Amino acid sequence: MNNELWDECVKFHGHICPGLTIGYKAAMLARKLFDGKSANDEEIVCITENDACGVDGIQVVLGCTFGKGNLIYKDHGKVAYSFYSRDSKKEFRLVFRRDIGGPTKRDEKQKFLLNSAEEDLFEIKEVKQPLPQKAKLFNTVICELCKEGAAEHRIRLFDGKKACVDCFEEYTRVY
């Protein structure tokens, strides 16, 4: 247990909870599998399949963030994280094991998770998707409807005008 990193996770997240602990443990296992490395830029990439507390632990421990483009969110509702190293080409998916049992009360569960070895908490699997591209910088285009700027790859044509995703009215005849 790295108390300094754990304290940083708690400070960043705002409180101690089992979800944060799961993310912290996943990040620590990934760091171990990456020979102790974390990301200064985009060297390590994480695709998280949830938007819960654990993602904060991954951001602190591994340096994967939305702003750097090396934290990608896939809304699958699973406590699973795919990790990639651009340098070593190593990649793996960590899936939280629901079969480990343990206590159900929040405080007891928290203590159980903190005292468990990372390897006992996760199943290590092959990744499901290839390594994502590096983050790109896009030009800003002004929406002709709301006059707000949006990244050019998110602009749509609507009635012959450039429209942001919020102003674009999807047309569908499929229900």
Image: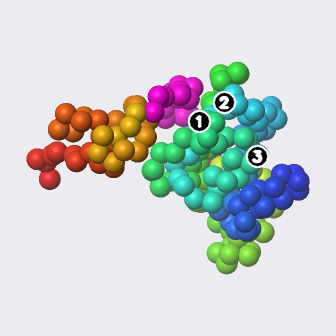
Between marks 2 and 3 in the image, the one whose residue lies nearer the viewer: 2
Residue bearing the label numbered 3: 61
* Quadrant hosting residue 165: top left
Is residue 11 a member of the stretch shown in magenta? no
Mark 1 touches mark 2? (CB < 8 Å): yes
Q: Position of residue 174 (x, y in %)?
A: 13, 48
- Under tag 1, what secondary structure? loop
Label at residue 42: 2
Q: Which amino acid does label 3 sit on?
A: Val
| Nearer to the camera, 86 or 26 | 86
Between marks 1 and 3 in the image, the one whose residue lies nearer the viewer: 1
- Under tag 3, what secondary structure? helix
Q: Give the range drawn in magenta.
A: 123-140
First-in-chain label (1 vs 2): 2
Mark 1, other Cα within 10 Å: few <14 / some 14–19 / many ≥20: some
Give the CA separation, mark 1 to mark 3. 16 Å
Q: Which amino acid does label 2 sit on?
A: Glu
Give the CA separation, mark 1 to mark 2. 7 Å
Determine whether 91 is above or below 48 in the image: above
Q: Position of residue 118 (x, y in %)?
A: 74, 50
